[in-house]
Image: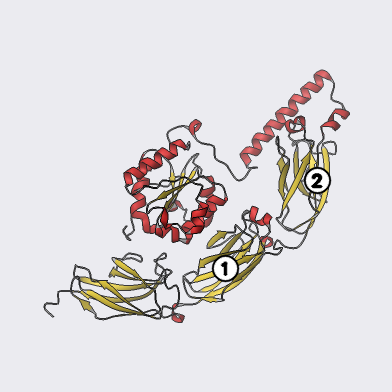
Amino acid sequence: MSEQETVCNVVPCRLDEESFIFVSYAHHDSDAVFPIIEDVGSKGYAIWYDKGISISSTWTDEIATAILNCAIFVMFITKESAESMYVRSEIEFALNNRVKVMPVYLDGMDVLPPGLALGLSATQGITDARDPESAARQICAALESNGVARKDAGKSANIKYKRRMKNSRAELGKLLRLAAAVIALIAVAFVLSGFISRSDAKRDNYSFKIEKRVFAPAEPIQVELRAVTQKMIERGAIIGVARASDKQGDYISYEFIDEDVPGIKLRAPLEDGDYVVRGYGSGSEFSESTLVGAVPFTVSGDSSGTFGLAIDRREYAPSENILVSVTGVPKYMLDDGAEVILSKAGEKPGEYIVYMVISTRDEQFTFSAPLDPGEYEMRAYSNNDVYAESTVAAREKFSVLGKEAYPFVIEPDKSSYAPGAQIAARVLGVAHNIGGGAILALSAAGSGPGEYISSERIYEKNASITLKAPSEPGEYELRGYWDRNVLTESGLAACIPFKVEDLGQE
């Protein structure tokens, strides 16, 4: 596969499309991936990939939103994508949020590391994708069998995929309208029959309890429901959280009670104080007569619990690996999508460069240090829906040092070469990321960052590397990059010019 950047003719769809495909891939694989998704897109399927990120958005937020709302998550797996931190974060995020996934193996299944292979073990994928046309046909067939609608198929054919926010405005409006209709019918029945006694209403009241009386900010409140009748559900019975001093009908958040639901999860407020869980028999009438119960509780402290976070050092080179350990993460935080994120120091809660989802009580992660020198933070959040100071369970500060602190020296054996001649170069002082991503690349002079003709990985601090000179005479450069996954000006560590020219007989 070519390392050159490839242009894709697929226009990313909007995130409010009824049914679309999320495409996860490594940029290294663009030459192989783009023809396939162009073919799939030509069949009428809506596709979103990272070219659709809005300029003004936080890219991780938009990627997370796209994954959560997609009809199916299609991942193109190669050796490079399996090693990419960004691709693996997307896959883990999709799996953790029960998004339907479809792996497409461009290099076979043997490239998967053990952890990722385990996560995808129960997922059926496309294993023979070496031919682009065949791969596109197989993907389209799988999309059709999974009920993914084409753009011109009409809304009635679109699949119904799970939305995370159960109390979205659309659902809320629908339920309120239903509750109003039910109440209107009850009122008519009351006028006609003159018979809804207070004793009947009392028999329809439900009861509930919560498991404890002190919660951390944003901690889930599990409410156990009892004796909920069909009549109460039809009336739009709700249960919610309010301040202890609030009047009847004032609340911070609430949930409608559905059929066959033994319990409801509410969320503790972010601020310390005294609160109450209240249950009402109607979602449109908040009064003492419709109040079925009230249980007080307190929000106190922070959300950390025994949640610990540690990093291996306090200073890193650009793109150097940062080893992060989390310990003692409570189960409710794992259920809530606890995360570790990398942010600039001083950034507001929720603003970050990259994140990883925590899946076990004790876990280790590897982040890449940012390319730009400066002060940064590694933060642990107890909840991936509520980014606030009170949900920061732990944090560790660190610095990324400039290039002057980590010399990267390239010493070619000559300043000019004959076409196709061997270039023997020494690379000195590469103090980090050995075997992880540092490369020596051969590029045309004046070409953009990341554009190169050939490259070799660097596996030793002081290494001898041989490259082949281009066949065309001209001006060229030997470039050293901190990380082959981040080929930018910031990732360029060193650059040495040389010429290719007809030198005659030597």
In this view of the protein, which residue sits in the foreground, 334 or 379?
Answer: 334
Residue 213 vertical position relative to residue 414 in the rendered view, above or below: above
Which of the image's four quarters has the C terminus? bottom left
| Disc marking residue 209 | 2
Q: Is residue 103 visible?
A: yes
- Marks 2 and 1, Cα distance to the nearest angstrom? 39 Å
Residue 428 vertical position relative to residue 450 in the rendered view, above or below: below
Classify residue 412 as left or right of residue 82. Answer: left
In this view of the protein, which residue sits in the foreground, 189 or 25?
Answer: 25
In this view of the protein, which residue sits in the foreground, 350 or 443?
Answer: 443
Q: Callout 2, which amino acid?
A: Lys
As drawn, the residue found furthest toward the left would be 505
Q: Secondary structure at mark 2?
A: strand
| Disc marking residue 200 | none
Q: Secondary structure at mark 1?
A: strand
| Disc marking residue 324 | 1
Tell me what residue is drawn at x 49 percent, y 74 percent.
Answer: 373
Question: Residue 335 placed where, x, y %?
Answer: 65, 53
Q: Is residue 62 visible?
A: no
As drawn, the residue found furthest toward the top would be 192
Q: Callout 1, which amino acid?
A: Val
Classify residue 124 as left or right of residue 189. Answer: left
- How dense is the environment of label 1, judged by Cα within 10 Å: few (below 14), some, or many (20 and up)? some
Tell me what residue is drawn at x 39 percent, y 79 percent.
Answer: 408
